[in-house]
Image (cartoon, grey):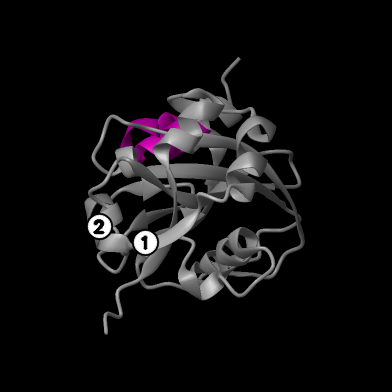
Amino acid sequence: MSTEEQILVIPTSVIEALGAFEGFEPDVDRYLKPLLASDQLSFQPRSQMEEDPSFKQLIPYVVLEWTDAEGQVHLFRYTRGSGQGEKRLHAKRSVGIGGHISSEDADSSDLYRTGMLRELNEELVIESKYEEQVVGLIYDPSTAVGRVHLGVVHLMKMESADVRNNESGLVDSGFAPLAELISQRDHFEIWSQLCLDHLYPQT
């Protein structure tokens, strides 16, 4: 019996019926609720889905924001080490925490949120209160990784910087000033670049 991870996916055709897009899409209401309510959602073997762009893997992508006493915005950032599951993203810098929704989340009445929180708690220890909002979706067909994933961007505004790494695969982690991260934009993975561009546009 196979023990391969079974991950949550949806046919690309379902997304396209709602309106095809590329890059960062801020119209969450148009897409997320219909997708999560769709009877076309299913769990499929991860190895097959990584090579099949006719399906999209739903990936929560959580951006943690903290504003210090001087009003300076910071984001939690890290570099993906070799312990991270997606080998094609190793050594990439990121401001998004996330991962697949797995069949182990299926017993919950809200499997998507259960999976999102499971992934977050596996990678971070969060000891701060926060406010959370879903702020957009990401689709980037320019890479082999991007063609098979649909990102759901969550913004968590932290009351304090009491967040620490809980995963050996995340290195050089912690909060850094937004201005510094924007100046280093080209060193980040594409999804993080899209978040920086659209959540924090420069005036």
Is disc 2 placed on a helix, strand or loop?
helix
Toward which corner of the image does residue 170 lie, by quadrant? bottom left
Q: Give the residues in magenta.
A: 182-195
* Residue depicted at x 33% and y 44%: 148
Is disc 1 placed on a helix, strand or loop?
strand
Few, some or many residues within 10 Å of mark 2 (<14, 14–19, 20+):
few
Q: Are marks 2 and 1 in contact (CB under 8 Å)?
A: yes
Toward which corner of the image does residue 99 lie, by quadrant? bottom left
For badge 2, the amino acid type reads Gln
**Residue sitting farthest toward the top:** 203
Q: Is 91 situated above or below 182?
A: below
Marking on residue 48: 2
Residue 169: x and y in percent read: 34, 67
Q: Is 60 situated above or below 114?
A: above
* Residue depicted at x 66% and y 65%: 162
Marking on residue 140: none
Task: Give yes or no for residue 165 being in the magenta stretch.
Answer: no
Toward which corner of the image does residue 136 lie, by quadrant? top right
Residue 50: x and y in percent read: 27, 52
Q: Nearer the viewer, residue 11 or 168?
A: 11
Task: Give yes or no for residue 184 being in the magenta stretch.
Answer: yes
For badge 1, the amino acid type reads Gln
**Quadrant placement of the C terminus:** top right
Residue 73: in sight, yes or no?
A: no
- Give the labeled residue for mark 1: 44
Most common secondary structure along the magenta stretch: helix
Residue 10: x and y in percent read: 45, 47
Q: Nearer the viewer, residue 2 or 84?
A: 2
Few, some or many residues within 10 Å of mark 1 (<14, 14–19, 20+):
some
Q: Is residue 123 left or right of residue 107?
A: left
Q: Is residue 103 left or right of residue 186?
A: right
Q: Nearer the viewer, residue 180 or 22?
A: 22
